Amino acid sequence: VQLQASGGGLVQPGGSLRLSCAASGSIFSIDNMGWYRQAPGKQREWVAIITSGGSTNYADSVKGRFTISRDNAKNTVYLQMNSLKPEDTAVYSCNAGILLRGSYKTTAYWGQGTQVTVSS
C-alpha cells in the first residue's frame, strides 16, 4: 500500500493550496483519513480527520480555514487550505486506516510529506 501526497508549494499569506493524498494497492476499505503537519523544530501535530462516513473534525488552529474531504471511489483525501498564514508552514503528511484485501485488521499507513511554505 502506498499513500502519495501532492499539492504543496510556496504561497503568499492569505493564499490557498489544495493537497491531495491517494492510496493505492490491494485495498479492501479505508476507515479514517487525516492530515498532520510538522513545522521545523516542532512536534508533529494533527490537522484534520474525516471518517469513512464523511464526518470531519479540525484542529482549532485551522478551523474555518481548512476543509478536509475525500473521494472514496478514488481512495483519495484532500485538504483545501484557505487564508494561509506563515505559521501554517510545515511538512504536511496524510494518514489512513486501511483494511487490505484478505486481511481482518485495519492498519494505519502514512504518506510521504509535502512541503507547504507560506511566505511573502
Image (spheres, grey):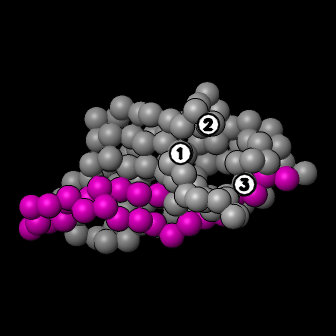
- Identify the residue under disc 3: 89
Q: Are marks 2 and 1 in contact (CB under 8 Å)?
A: yes
- Quadrant in the picture for residue 83: top right
Secondary element at image label 3: loop
- Identify the residue under disc 1: 47
Q: Are marks 3 and 2 in contact (CB under 8 Å)?
A: no
* Majority SS type along the magenta span: strand
Q: Which of the two labelled residues, at mark 2 and mark 1, occupies the earlier sequence position?
A: 1
Residues in magenta?
Answer: 94-119
Distance (Cα) linking label 3 and label 2: 12 Å
Q: Mark 1 is on which residue type? A: Val
Magenta highlight on residue 87: no
- Which of the labelled discs sits on residue 62, or is there none? 2
- Quadrant in the picture for residue 105: bottom left
Q: Which of the two labelled residues, at mark 3 and mark 2, occupies the earlier sequence position?
A: 2
Res 92 visible: no
Q: Is residue 82 left or right of residue 36?
A: right
Q: Is residue 100 left or right of residue 44?
A: left
Percent position (x, y) of residue 94? 47, 58
Viewer-proximal residue among 105 and 26? 105
- Quadrant in the picture for residue 66: top right
- In which quadrant of the rendered image does the N terminus lie? bottom left
Task: Specify the farthest residue to the top.
Answer: 64
